[in-house]
């Protein structure tokens, strides 16, 4: 069934069924649940929905805003409205030092990235402090949106001393793969996880509503000799990850 036929009011609208925007909201919700409106697909423009339903633009806008507030629809400035992309939750154990690429490939998922920043830069005060760099040292910085099977999962920003990663442009998929090849793969890390609400820009990249729950992960990784090799800050979709740690009774 095409969207025009699905939204034709003769099949679902009732004059005594309550406010029009609530009935339209329910019809759109039904379309999502039935798979007629597929995750990630664009919603027709407000004027098109108004023409199909013979409802006012105000009514249509109210129904769409209500669904956007619930997270069913994502509104992107200048692009229109889209059906929210639902992702299956991933259980991530906190016992192994692995990369995003390794985690996803182990689950049989296709990994891709959208580059946000990549190159050599003068370090910020935070990068100098975290990586123990001198003021005249350069830092290699790579920032990207990480995707699994085409679904945005995390925004990952890594900073490394320039002598450990002298050419950030050679990183195509896995940073750790490049570091291992050059003998600089970290062997241990300290990782801090905190809950946040995603800001508008972050939510737009991750294709979730602004203010949605996210996980902020800060990782400091070390080489075998103890040197700090990596300072990474990542933002993960809160609806996509469960982090799991196994605990045992301490024998004191």
Image (cartoon, rainbow, N blue to C red):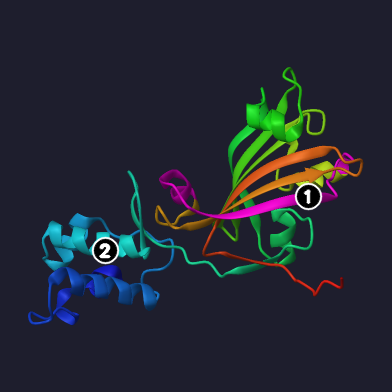
Earlier-in-chain disc, 1 versus 2: 2
Q: Which residues are magenta?
A: 181-205
Please identify the quadrant where the N terminus is shown.
bottom left
Residue 250: horizontal and vertical position, in percent? Answer: 82, 71
**In the rendered image, which residue does mark 1 sit on?**
189
Residue 1 appears in view: no
Residue 9: horizontal and vertical position, in percent? Answer: 16, 75
Residue 187 appears in view: yes
Q: Nearer the viewer, mark 1 or mark 2?
A: 1
54 sits to left or right of 86:
left
Distance, label 1 to label 2, CA atoms, is 43 Å
Circle 2: element type: helix
Residue at x 7% of width, y 79% of height? 15
Q: Residue furthest top?
A: 136
Q: Residues within 10 Å of mark 1 (few under 14, many from 20)?
A: some
Q: Residues within 10 Å of mark 2 (few under 14, many from 20)?
A: some
Circle 1: element type: strand
Residue at x 73% of width, y 17% of height? 136
Q: Is residue 16 above or below residue 39?
A: below
Q: Is residue 196 magenta?
A: yes
177 sits to left or right of 37:
right
Q: Is residue 196 above or below residue 132?
A: below
Q: Are marks 1 and 2 in contact (CB under 8 Å)?
A: no
Residue 110: horizontal and vertical position, in percent? Answer: 66, 60
- Residue placed most toward the observer, 50 or 233: 233
Residue at x 40% of width, y 56% of height? 209
Please identify the quadrant where the C terminus is shown.
bottom right
Q: Is residue 87 above or below residue 222?
A: below
Q: Residue furthest front?
A: 252
**Labelled disc at residue 66:** 2
Residue 93: horizontal and vertical position, in percent? Answer: 72, 66
Residue at x 32% of width, y 60% of height? 68
């Amino acid at each position: 069934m095409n969207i025009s036929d699905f939204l034709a009011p003769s099949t679902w609208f009732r004059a005594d069924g309550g406010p029009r925007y609530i009935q339209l909201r329910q019809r759109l919700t039904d379309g999502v649940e039935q798979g007629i409106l597929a995750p990630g697909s664009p919603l027709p423009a407000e004027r098109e929905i108004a023409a199909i339903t013979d409802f006012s633009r105000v009514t249509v806008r109210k129904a769409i805003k209500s669904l956007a507030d619930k997270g069913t629809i994502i509104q992107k400035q200048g692009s229109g409205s889209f059906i929210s992309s639902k992702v299956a939750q991933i259980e991530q154990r906190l016992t192994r030092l692995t990369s995003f690429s390794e985690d996803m490939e182990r689950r049989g998922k296709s990994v891709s990235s959208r580059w946000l920043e990549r190159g050599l830069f003068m370090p910020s005060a935070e990068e100098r402090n975290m990586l123990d760099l001198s003021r005249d040292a350069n830092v290699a910085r790579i920032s990207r949106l990480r995707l699994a099977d085409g679904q945005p999962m995390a925004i990952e920003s890594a900073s490394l001393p320039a002598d450990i990663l002298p050419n950030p442009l050679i990183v195509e998929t896995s940073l750790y793969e490049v570091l291992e090849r050059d003998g600089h793969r970290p062997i241990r890390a300290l990782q801090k996880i905190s809950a946040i609400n995603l800001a508008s820009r972050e939510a737009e990249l991750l294709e979730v509503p602004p203010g949605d729950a996210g996980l902020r992960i800060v990782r400091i990784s070390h080489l075998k000799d103890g040197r700090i090799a990596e300072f990474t800050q990542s933002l993960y979709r809160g609806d996509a990850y469960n982090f799991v740690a196994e605990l045992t009774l301490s024998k004191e």
